[in-house]
């Protein structure tokens, strides 16, 4: 029996021993060495051949990933590790570091209880490192630290042993600072990492060795020995004396929580239901015999098995042939296959129990982010909050008309597998829009449509998605009349305060007002909203709120549903350029209604309210908001001029500049619209000697001078009249 088969057998046995399970992720800044590390962990546990580890990149099994040398899909793998005489099952999810795939990282964090944050010894903590730590802590995931590429410090930068330790101290201090800034209250100070207790490891994933203080005691090695081995180019001996998988997995077992321990504090954070209900109790206690509760974090498309849903089982057990419900979908789905993931292989098993990561086929309705249960009325998990949202769009057309039906099907499939890709299929105009996190995200998705799904496509130049808002409060209420002139609605619009927009974005206020009216009202009042305004809230759509502040108007509550419908329509497509709206407080301040219900149906109420909101917005100094990116550039001093010239040409503002030895770090922000083609421009301007990355940071008002021209361009592209309609247009 080979080592791999032996491991599969052990994995099946350990699946039910909760104290012996660890669900972990590896997260880091791009190119800091995550995938190489996960490969070496798998190889050390006998899952792939050791010679190839680090070169094989087993978890990058997508050819596009191997070509570009970056990880795009979060792959998962299980392995068995022995620690202090006991065996442990470790379920590992590898995540991408590139900012365009941040959605994948956020979803992976939902499925794990702990994560290894990888930081490069040469570059230190980078902006993306900060983002990954924030994503982990937001999901109550406990981090430990691995400082990678130590060999480069010694061999390329030629630091002395003392300088090397100073550098480590600096990285650890920065890491703990970030933790304390962002950790949930109950863990502040408790989750800090320290070398002496083994919650920090140092090493080289590429050369397959690592070290931690407990492992030094165990193996008799010290920093000086390591320094000498690296200097003498003898890292092979080091890998034998102190193999990376042993050091890292010891740290995982010792410092990261088991599902049994983690679910107690993670469930209240990711699930809004009643914790005293049978399902609530079962999840808190990770019961294998409780009701089923499975959170899907990824859909993998398999040419043979179809859609494979990968997720974390929080309660109950899932078996072959079982009927399950995707919450929010009416019909049950039947489970066809249940698998444990081992590297790129799926190993079929009869069932998997609570506390594990599982891959299931047959759940047709699932998308990444779905909740699966054994009853249709289970309270779903919290919506996963993505750190950034899709802001770049391309129009996608089939090259040959015969491929059109297939293209539409492929686009639907893609948005199912990657919820950070937003697809809009317009049957009337035949235009299909695909939005993603950035240029690279869309490029890779286009590549997949052509190569994996075999559909030839033509895509437009990338377009930026704007948002509409208002700069001030409506000067006076705006009247909207129904087509039969028997109903009138009076609306005022004003900008929502920044703190409320932020709370909506972070999912701190439930968007289902009907179901959580009390919580919504309380949350809004706590954030400083006027009591009457908060009590009147009817609907929340995106980052916009609709409230009814009228007093004692007959029949009005009967039309609330229709008013909310009209509000939702306007929020999806504003009056300036038919772009989505953001940051609006829409108030219904008065209404006159016909007493006969027949005369105040949808055909009367919806247009009246819609016109009133449009008109009110047009009188409140309407503005366009453009998506912004944080741009971080690290460049040699002599090239600083070229780098900053590239930025100023793109309406960027430099927020901070720091110098480290002969490198300059520039922290700037720039509009996404100006950043197209930045990658090749900065490379040619600096001869490729520059490190840079970007991160989406939300929306800011477009400079007034540019607004008319941008609006005209968007309207012409959408086939609308070039000028937005004036308020008078909405009065009749």
Image (cartoon, helix red, strand yellow):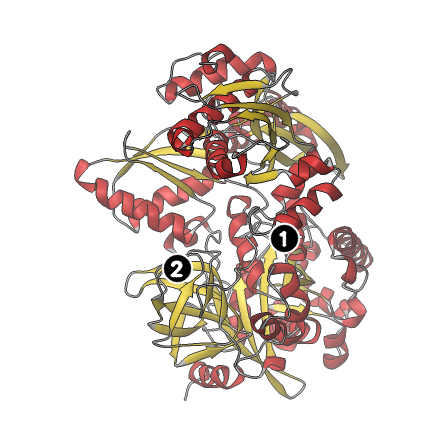
In the rendered structure, the answer to whether residue 323 lies left or right of residue 151 reads left
Residue lying at the far left in this picture: please name it.
402
Q: How many marks?
A: 2
Q: Nearer the viewer, residue 611 or 385?
A: 611
Counting from the top left corner in percent of width and height, residue 376 is at 44, 64
**Numbered mark located on residue 300 in the image:** 2
The residue tagged 1 is 135
Q: Is residue 705 above or below residue 664?
A: above
Helix, strand or loop for disc 2:
strand
Counting from the top left corner in percent of width and height, residue 161 is at 79, 60
Q: Is residue 245 above or below residue 659?
A: below
Q: Nearer the viewer, residue 589 or 134?
A: 589
Q: Nearer the viewer, residue 689 or 410?
A: 410
Measured in 3D between alpha carbons, the distance from the residue under mark 1 to the one under mark 2, in whole angstroms, is 22 Å
Pick the quarter of the image with the C terminus. Answer: top left
Counting from the top left corner in percent of width and height, residue 39 is at 51, 66
How packed mark 1 is, by other alpha carbons closer than 10 Å (few <14, some 14-19, many 20 or more), is many
Residue, x 46% and y 35% (percent of image)? Answer: 562
Counting from the top left corner in percent of width and height, residue 573 is at 46, 28
Residue, x 46% and y 71% (percent of image)? Answer: 358
Q: Earlier in the sequence, mark 1 or mark 2?
A: 1
- Can residue 613 be seen here? The reply is yes
In the rendered structure, the answer to whether residue 642 lies left or right of residue 454 reads right
**Numbered mark located on residue 632 in the image:** none
């Amino acid at each position: 029996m080979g080592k791999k088969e032996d491991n599969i057998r052990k994995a099946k046995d350990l699946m039910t021993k909760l104290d012996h399970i660890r669900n972990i992720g590896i997260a880091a800044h791009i190119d800091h060495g995550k995938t190489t590390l996960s490969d070496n962990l798998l190889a050390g546990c006998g899952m792939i051949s050791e010679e190839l580890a680090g070169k094989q990149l087993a978890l990058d099994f997508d050819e596009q990933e191997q070509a570009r040398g970056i990880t795009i899909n979060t792959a998962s793998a299980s392995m068995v590790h022995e620690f202090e005489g006991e065996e442990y099952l470790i379920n590992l999810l590898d995540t991408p570091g590139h900012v365009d795939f941040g959605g994948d990282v956020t979803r992976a964090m939902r499925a794990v209880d702990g994560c290894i944050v990888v930081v490069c010894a040469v570059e230190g903590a980078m902006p993306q490192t900060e983002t990954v730590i924030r994503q982990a802590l937001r999901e109550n995931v406990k981090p430990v630290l691995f400082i990678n590429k130590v060999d480069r410090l010694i061999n390329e930068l030629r630091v002395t042993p003392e300088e090397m330790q100073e550098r480590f101290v600096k990285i650890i201090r920065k890491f703990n600072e970030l933790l304390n800034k962002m950790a949930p209250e109950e863990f502040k100070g408790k989750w800090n990492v320290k070398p002496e207790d083994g919650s920090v490891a140092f090493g080289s994933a590429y050369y397959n060795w690592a070290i931690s203080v407990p492992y030094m005691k165990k193996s008799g090695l010290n920093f000086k020995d390591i320094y000498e081995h690296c200097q003498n180019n003898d890292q092979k001996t080091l890998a034998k004396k102190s193999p990376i998988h042993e050091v890292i997995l010891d740290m995982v077992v010792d410092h990261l929580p088991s599902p049994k321990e983690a679910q107690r504090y993670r469930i209240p954070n990711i699930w809004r239901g009643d914790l005293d209900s049978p399902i609530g109790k079962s999840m808190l206690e990770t019961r294998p015999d409780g009701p089923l509760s499975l959170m899907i974090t990824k859909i993998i498309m398999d040419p043979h098995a179809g859609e494979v849903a990968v997720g974390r089982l929080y309660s109950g057990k899932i078996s072959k042939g079982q009927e399950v419900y995707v919450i929010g979908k009416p019909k049950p789905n039947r489970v066809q296959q249940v698998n444990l993931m081992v590297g790129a292989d799926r190993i079929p098993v009869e069932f998997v129990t609570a506390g594990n990561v599982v891959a299931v086929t047959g759940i047709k309705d699932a998308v990444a982010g779905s909740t699966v249960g054994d009853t249709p009325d289970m309270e779903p998990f919290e919506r996963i909050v993505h750190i950034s949202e899709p802001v770049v769009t391309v129009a996608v057309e089939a090259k040959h008309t015969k491929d059109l039906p297939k293209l539409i099907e492929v686009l639907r499939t893609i948005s199912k597998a990657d919820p950070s890709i937003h697809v809009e299929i317009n049957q009337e105009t035949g235009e299909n829009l695909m939005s993603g996190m950035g240029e690279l995200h869309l490029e890779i998705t286009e590549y997949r449509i052509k190569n994996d799904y075999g559909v030839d496509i033509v895509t437009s130049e990338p377009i930026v998605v704007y948002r509409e808002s208002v700069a001030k409060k409506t000067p006076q209420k705006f009247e909207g009349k129904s087509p039969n002139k028997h109903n009138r609605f009076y609306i005022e619009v004003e900008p929502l305060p920044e703190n409320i927009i932020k709370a909506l974005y972070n999912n701190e206020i439930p968007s289902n007002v009907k179901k959580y009216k009390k919580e919504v009202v309380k949350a809004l009042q706590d954030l400083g909203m006027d009591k009457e305004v908060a009590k009147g809230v009817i609907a929340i759509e995106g980052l916009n709120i609709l409230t009814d502040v009228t007093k004692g108007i007959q029949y009005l509550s009967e039309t609330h549903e229709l008013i909310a419908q009209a509000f939702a329509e306007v929020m999806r497509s504003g009056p300036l350029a038919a772009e989505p709206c953001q940051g609006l407080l829409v108030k219904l301040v008065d209404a006159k209604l016909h007493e006969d219900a027949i005369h105040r149906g949808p055909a009367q109420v919806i247009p009246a309210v819609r016109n009133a909101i449009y008109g009110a917005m047009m009188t409140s100094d309407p503005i366009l908001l453009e998506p912004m990116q944080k741009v971080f550039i690290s460049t040699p001093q002599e090239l600083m001029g070229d780098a900053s010239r590239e930025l100023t040409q793109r309406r960027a503002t430099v927020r901070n500049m720091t110098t480290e030895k002969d490198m300059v770090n520039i922290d700037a922000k720039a509009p996404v619209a100006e950043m197209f083609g930045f990658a090749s421009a900065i490379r040619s301007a600096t001869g490729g000697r520059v490190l840079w990355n970007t991160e989406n940071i939300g929306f800011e008002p477009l400079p007034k001078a540019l607004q008319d021209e941008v609006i005209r361009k968007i309207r012409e592209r959408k086939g609308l009249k070039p000028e937005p309609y004036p308020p008078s247009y909405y009065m009749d």
